[in-house]
Amino acid sequence: NRDIGSVNGVKLAMGNKNYEVITECVAIKDEYMYCVAREMNIILKINKESLQVEIMTNMPDEDGMVSRLYFGIYIDGDEMMLVPCNAKKLWIYNFVTCTWKGLALDDFIDPNMEAKFVGGALKNGMAYLYGFKYKGILKVNVKSGEITELLEKQGEYAFWGESTAELDNKLYVANRLESNVMCIDTYNAKIKKIFIDECKQRDKYKNDGIVNVGDTFYIMSHHGNYFIKWNSREETQIIEIDKIFDTMESYFNGIAASKDIVFLYGSKKKNFIYNINSPNNSYVLDGNIYFAKYYENIGFVVCKKGKINIYDSQYRLLNIIDININNSEHDMIMKKNKIESKVYKENDFVRLNEFVKLFEEN
């Protein structure tokens, strides 16, 4: 077992009774991976070579913090962005000055709105935020704090999925409500709507994520046993997957890809590995997975409960990083950061009999 320590040198010793930390997003800078921890106001800093894990403790502070603060972490140059899920500000960290800068978004969203954003990107000094509750795209100038809404008719858009594709200084985000992809030029912030010719969509929500390997894009469907292969020449191919997923249930939260496989993953205990070169060797993978992304110099970084697994481009296991802290130290972190209440997520629900009982008791 490895020790988990903080960047100020204080070690958090591993204990027999451990809290299994869930990490939900990963960004890379130099020799380190930076990971957002679910429902905790901390960032894990992991050395790619030694796999030593540290905890960043100089985190931003807000009044009335609640759980599920951040839904993503992105790095560009010397700056790191935290996508606000239930945090009230967009937070930017500068690696040179080791300081945080909070940018209020009150004029564009209700600061008390739950699950404000679910994704974004940081590129050329601009932060881009998009969401499920916020049905548009915000562009934030990190230096000046100027905020611009990039989509005028926000009701026509909704974004989900834990992936944003990038190619030639352009960002690609899949629209949930229509068969199109939004292409954002990061130099001039102009948006081009690209329609995807796809005839099999059958529900209110269409696309739930997008990833690319070079100029080949893969678009995850919200429902159905297929995903879409698409390229910058706007050529489209429907790729069928296992019939086990041929229901109206949404199995996947995100999509990742290497030159060898496409990986559809989620927290519903069923995932799918599609073999690009040998489709007949594709298979269903069991287990809850909270985030996955492929990095050329690392492999697939896959976040599970209490661990981060590293796989090669063909999804063969390379390393396992244990992410566990002592329960008492978890409680100390939560108390220190004033995490007081739980926010319900999209898939949370109350059973009908419990709902009725609640009213009867009151």
Image: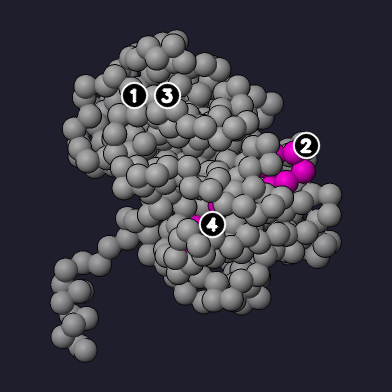
Residue 306: which numbered mark, if any?
none
The mark lying in front, picked from 4 and 3, is 4
Tell me the crowding category of disc 4: few under 14, some 14 to 19, or many 20 or more residues within 10 angstroms, Cα based.
Answer: many
Of pointers 4 and 3, the one earlier in the residue sequence: 4
Q: Which residues, given as a range, are shown in magenta?
A: 73-86
The mark lying in front, picked from 2 and 4, is 4
**Mark 2 secondary-structure assignment:** loop
Instruction: From the viewer's perspective, tell me whether residue 302 is left or right of residue 91.
Output: left
Q: Are marks 2 and 4 in contact (CB under 8 Å)?
A: no
Rounded to the nearest angstrom, the CA distance separating label 1 from label 3 is: 14 Å
Residue 84: which numbered mark, if any?
4
Rounded to the nearest angstrom, the CA distance separating label 2 from label 3 is: 27 Å
Q: Which residue is mark 2?
A: 30
- Residue drawn at 47 percent across, 74 percent down: 341
How many callouts does the rendering have?
4
- Residue drawn at 29 percent across, 39 percent down: 177
Q: Quadrant of residue 91?
A: bottom right
Going by the numbered disc 1, the residue's amino acid type is Phe
- Residue drawn at 63 percent across, 60 percent down: 103
Image location of residue 254, percent across then percent down: 43, 38
Instruction: From the viewer's perspective, tell me whether residue 197 is left or right of residue 302.
Output: left
**Mark 3 secondary-structure assignment:** strand
Going by the numbered disc 2, the residue's amino acid type is Asp
Q: Which residue is mark 3?
A: 218
**Mark 1 secondary-structure assignment:** strand
- Work out whether residue 81 or residue 340 is closer to the camera in this orientation and state it: 81
Rounded to the nearest angstrom, the CA distance separating label 1 from label 4 is: 29 Å
**Residue 14 showing in the rendered view:** no
Image location of residue 219, percent across then percent down: 39, 27
Is 79 colored magenta in this rendering? yes
**Mark 4 secondary-structure assignment:** strand
Q: Which residue is mark 1?
A: 195
